[in-house]
Amino acid sequence: MTLRVIAIDGPAASGKSSTGALVAERLGWAHLDSGALYRAMTLAALDNLGDEGGGKGEGWNPQRIVALAQELPITLALVGREFVPTVAGVDVEEAVRSERVTTRVSAVAALPEVRAWVNAEQQRVVRQHPAGVVVDGRDIGTVVFPDAPLKVFLTATPEERARRRLTQRGQAPDAERVRRESQALAARDDADRERPVAPLKPAADAVLLDTTHVSLEEQVARVVALARARFRG
Ligand code: DC
């Protein structure tokens, strides 16, 4: 049976989650933002393991983070079409977007034990979904679902991604803010690209979509057209 998964990968703020959610809506599928699960692991570590990591989280013991995920537990709950992360039964969709989580999440996502747990959780919920799931992240097409029939890799310049992120936050995208935000995004991209385990990179068979000059509506339409061709019947 064909695996009903669309993998959308790409760097931070490339529009993966907005695209994934809208593609899922058009197809009648569900959407899973895998970054939110890494963020939930980071939030749980911050709240329960304190600053053991010497301020940056690098010193956190990976086994303790995974044990926490099992004990609390951290899970994915399907709310409408969206898989949202929960910690001890509480929806943490909003809480995981905080700055304190954002600055630590790359270090947590670099831990192989954490990645193994997150991957198993994603594979579990996808297996149980009857229609299909659009999954977005950094390693979905390369590691988590290497057999996904459709893989898309979204890119955009750091400046364009910074502008989108600022606008999303309701901040004016003036030159100084764009400069600072694009530097922060580039630093996070480097950390994700250069880590030894499951680094950010397009799968060999991914469709590359540079969205710097493409509207969200247009990029959604392109992915939906590709999906309709790949998942006929
Ligand atoms: O997409 P995001 O900003 O919410 O992702 C948060 C972090 O998690 C980011 O540093 C990259 C990491 N991540 C990952 O390593 N693999 C994924 N499949 C998704 C996210």
Image: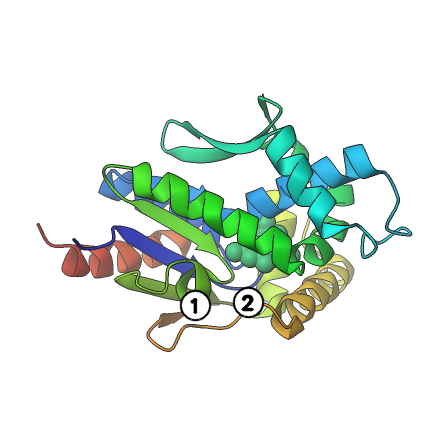
Q: What is the total number of numbered labels drawn onto the structure image?
A: 2
Q: Is residue 171 visible?
A: no
Q: Is residue 173 left or right of residue 54?
A: left
Left/right placement of residue 110 relative to residue 75 reads right
Residue under the image location 68 percent in, 48 percent down: 172
Mark 2 secondary-structure assignment:
loop
Q: Where does label 1 land, which residue?
A: 142
* Residue beneath the point at 55% across and 54% down: 116
Residue 128 has which mark? none
Query: Percent x, y for residue 89?
Result: 58, 21
| Tag 1–tag 2 contact (CB < 8 Å) | yes
**At which x and y percent is residue 107?**
73, 57
- Please name the residue that numbered disc 2 is placed on: 198
Q: Is mark 2 within 8 Å of ligand 1?
A: yes
Residue lying farthest to the right in this orientation: 54
- Label 1 secondary element: helix
Residue at the outermost bottom position: 204
The image quadrant of residue 58 is: bottom right
Residue at image point 15% right, 60% down? 229
Of the residues shown, which amino acid type is indicated by label 1?
A: Thr
